[in-house]
Image (tube, rainbow, N blue to C red):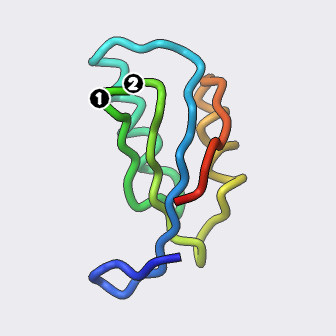
Amino acid sequence: MKQSSNTLNQSDIVIHINEKMDSQHRSQFSNKVSKLDGVVSAVLQKKCPQLMIVAYNPLKTKAFKVINGIRKTGMQAQIVSWL
C-alpha cells in the first residue's frame, strides 16, 4: 500500500478487460468504474487498451468488490496484478 498526497490509503490493481471498446465506450466505462464505491481512479491504458489501472481506498472497499463491480457492468474482467 502507498500513501497518496491527501493521506488517504490507496492500493492499485491492474485489471484485464476481455472485451474491445471504441473510444467513446472506453470513456464511459472508465467513468462508471471511477464511480464505484471506494474507487479513487480508473484509467484504461492507451498502449494496451484492455488493461485498466484502478486505484482504490482499501479502508472503503476490497479488490474483489472492485472486480465484481466491473463485472456487474457486463464486462468480463480479471485482476492480473497488484501494484
Pick the residue in front: 52 or 69.
52
Q: Dot 2, how many residues are within 10 Å of its Cα: few (below 14), some (14-19), or many (20+)? A: some
Q: Quadrant of residue 32?
A: top left
In this rendering, is residue 67 above or below 46?
below
Instruction: Using the image, tell me which numbered label, if any, was put on residue 46.
Output: 1
Residue 3, horizontal then vertical, whole percent: 41, 82
* Horizontal side, residue 24 vs residue 50: left or right: left
Q: Amino acid at mark 1?
A: Lys
* Callouts 2 and 1 close, C-beta under 8 Å: yes
Residue at 51% across, 51% down: 36
| Residue at (47, 58) in percent of width and height | 39
- Say which residue appears at 47% left-offset and 43% top-offset: 33
Q: Look at the picture and state if 46 lies above or below 34.
A: above
Picture residue at 47% right of the left edge, 25% below the top: 50
* Badge 1 element: loop
Residue 75, image x, y percentages:
60, 24
Around disc 1, counting alpha carbons within 10 Å, would you say few (fewer than 14), some (14 to 19), or many (20 or more)?
few
Q: Find residue 49 and name its label.
A: 2
Whole-percent x, y for residue 73 in the image: 58, 29
